Image (cartoon, rainbow, N blue to C red):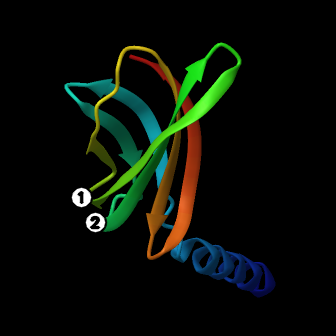
Amino acid sequence: MTGHWGLLIGFVLILFIVTAGCTSVSVGTISYGNDNLTVAVAGPGTPQTIYVQVRVFTLDQFAQQDLLTTGITANLTGADTNVSIPMHLDPGRYKMYVYIFQNGERETAVIRDITV
């Protein structure tokens, strides 16, 4: 019986070590209104400082053109935070490349299409 407990404790310790540093951040809904792009960011539940970078491309027929790149530093206070990035977009279709950086390293990236 002691051998099984040793294996179980060893497994739990390895699981703890592997997951202890997990601080994943993910991007949720992206919306635009009142000259602000709002990016929903889901964090690990602990306060963190992140940098949100957005590359915006216009979509016209079968082509896309680089319109702007901007970003903002944001403080995640809990699990979910809406980050507002000031920008003006005319009515049309856009492709958004959203990158989340933490401690100088990219945590995640998503590509989303929006219509204004």
Distance (Cα) linking label 2 and label 1? 4 Å
Whether tag 2 and tag 1 are in contact, CB under 8 A, the answer is: yes
Q: Nearer the viewer, residue 67 or 75?
A: 67
Q: Amino acid at mark 2?
A: Pro
Q: Is residue 82 above or below residue 19?
A: above
Question: Image quarter for residue 107?
Answer: bottom right
Q: Residue furthest left?
A: 34
Q: Nearer the viewer, residue 104 or 40?
A: 104
Please state the total of marks drawn on the protein image: 2
Whether residue 2 sits left or right of residue 18 in the image: it is right
Task: Tell me which label, 2 or 1, sits earlier in the chain.
Answer: 2
Quadrant including the C terminus: top left
Q: Residue at x 65, y 13 (%)?
A: 61
Q: Residue at x 73, y 85 (%)?
A: 6
Question: Image quarter for residue 2?
Answer: bottom right
Q: Residues within 10 Å of mark 1 (few under 14, many from 20)?
A: some
Q: Amino acid at mark 1?
A: Thr
Disc sitting over residue 47 in the figure: 2
Identify the residue position indicated by label 1 in the image: 77
Q: Residues within 10 Å of mark 2 (few under 14, many from 20)?
A: few
